[in-house]
Image: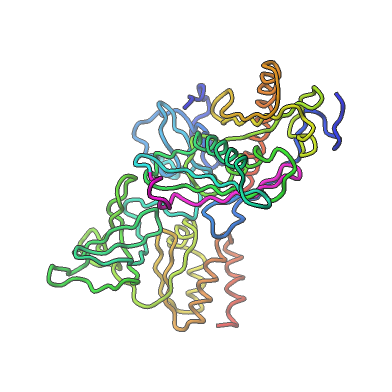
Amino acid sequence: WKMDTASTETMESKVGKVVLPGDTIGPITDLRIRLGPGLLQNQENIVATKCGILRNPHPKYYWIDSNQKRYVPSIEDMVIGLVTDRHAEGFKVNIGGAFAGSLANLSFEGATKKNKPNIQIGGIVYGRIILANKDMEPELVCISARNKAEGYGELMGGYVFQCSIGLSYALLDDECPILLELGRVLPYEIAVGMNGRVWIKAGTPKHTSIIANAILNSENMTLDQVKALVRKLKPFL
Amino acid sequence: MATRKDNRSSNQLRSISSEQGVLVRADGSCRFSQGNSQVMVAIYGPMEVQRQTKELIDRAYIEVIYKPRSGIASPADKEKEKYIKNCVEAAILSTLHPRTEISIVVQVLNEDGSIVSTAVNAACLALIDAGIPMKNMIAATTIAYLDGDLILDPTEKEEKESSSIFTFAIHSQSDGTLAVRTKGFFSEDEFNHASEASQGACERVFSFLRRSLEKKYAE
């Protein structure tokens, strides 16, 4: 892995610009910075491993903003899983990564050895990844850090669809335009998994279908385009 | 230097175009063309290994499938698969995804010479589209000797009349050749000249890749 010759450009000059895999972002000048997705340390330099825009909103954190469809499990991610198997100790859950995750029976609020969760194969769960490294099978729990459910657990009814990882991150924003605009015109319940899966529950199948399509189409839209989209949908509700 | 049938000079590449994210069901995809040679590459992965015996405990298993425009893959196509695999393995950070498989499917849409270098360039863009972590980018060009003249990016007609054809791949973070495949008779001098010419040609491919990716991500 050849070292880039002395890079005179600092990291700051590349922030907000598109970087390509192999690009040297800059020499490490401050050891207290944290490298997020898409960045790796190569001896004294920081190198990009993905294509995207370099972000640095906080002096300590650097990462590459990029989008992909395939989920790679990461610790503390909130994900939507599909139960594929049950055994004595827990469940095997499909979270969309290369490997199935394991969810222990006791990782639910109020669960004891006598009181196990009654989730069937094919059930949908909203969980939190507690173990994710490249060599081990990922593990998730349906309980918050304070040992309360707080939204985690089985999702009853509703409809799950897939989207890109980037879109699921955008949906988790407090000011997500499409979700706010849709909420103005019809009531619905939503759970967003950072593994590119979205669960919605609305009054009728027609509303469910409209919401799902609206969310998928809103991926690269500006606020004005989103408003126009919802305005066009109103007569069909 | 004599101009070629399509009025190009000897060191002129055909026009390149690419489009990423064309296949909805693939994790990453790219349709890439050099002149009339067009290739579509689909990337699946990192996912569970399809054939258990291929699983590697410390890295991802990379599989390349090359499909010609018509008919089934021949032994010559298997050699192309091996070459493309050698090129991408140098770029992909496979140790970040042990016990998984990254599947690269190359479908030739139209064949008009320099097809393997088109495939390598397409694979690089498709891998980026899929978000597979890479330590560098790869670019390839095809060079041929036709009537004693060195020409870049030959068409199918030119390849048929050439005495030797070389496909050079280089990667963006290192000088020299990453992988080369050859066909025909050539001297050591001819090989060295071709190798030198490939460096400049691949630089042009890299700047195309960079420009198209910058345009894609521009806000």
Residue B36 colored magenta? yes
Locate residue B85, reporting x and y percent.
Answer: 53, 39
Residue situated in front as seen by the camera: A198 or A115: A115
Q: Quadrant of residue B153 in the image?
A: top right
A92 relative to A192 in the view: left or right: left
Magenta residue span: B31-55
Quadrant location of the C terminus of chain A? bottom right
For the point 59% across and 54% down, which residue is it?
Answer: B21
Locate residue B128, reporting x and y percent.
Answer: 54, 45
Would you place residue A235 above or below residue A39 in this image?
A: below
For the point 54% across and 25% down, which residue is it?
Answer: B174
The residue most toward the front is: B75
Q: Quadrant of residue A122 in the image?
A: bottom left
Q: Provide the major secondary structure of the magenta segment.
A: strand
Would you place residue B170 above or below residue A189 in this image?
A: above
For the point 36% across and 61% down, which residue is it?
Answer: A94
Residue A136 colored magenta? no
The residue most toward the left is: A114
Residue situated in front as seen by the camera: B85 or A118: B85
Locate residue B55, reporting x and y percent.
Answer: 38, 45
Is residue B218 visible in the rendered structure shown here?
no
For the point 30% across and 68% down, which residue is it?
Answer: A151
Residue situated in front as seen by the camera: B121 or B134: B121
Locate residue B47, reporting x and y percent.
Answer: 43, 52
B16 relative to A201 in the view: left or right: right
Give the colouring mode of the picture. Answer: rainbow
Would you place residue A116 above or below residue B109 in this image?
A: below
Is residue B172 visible in the rendered structure shown here?
yes
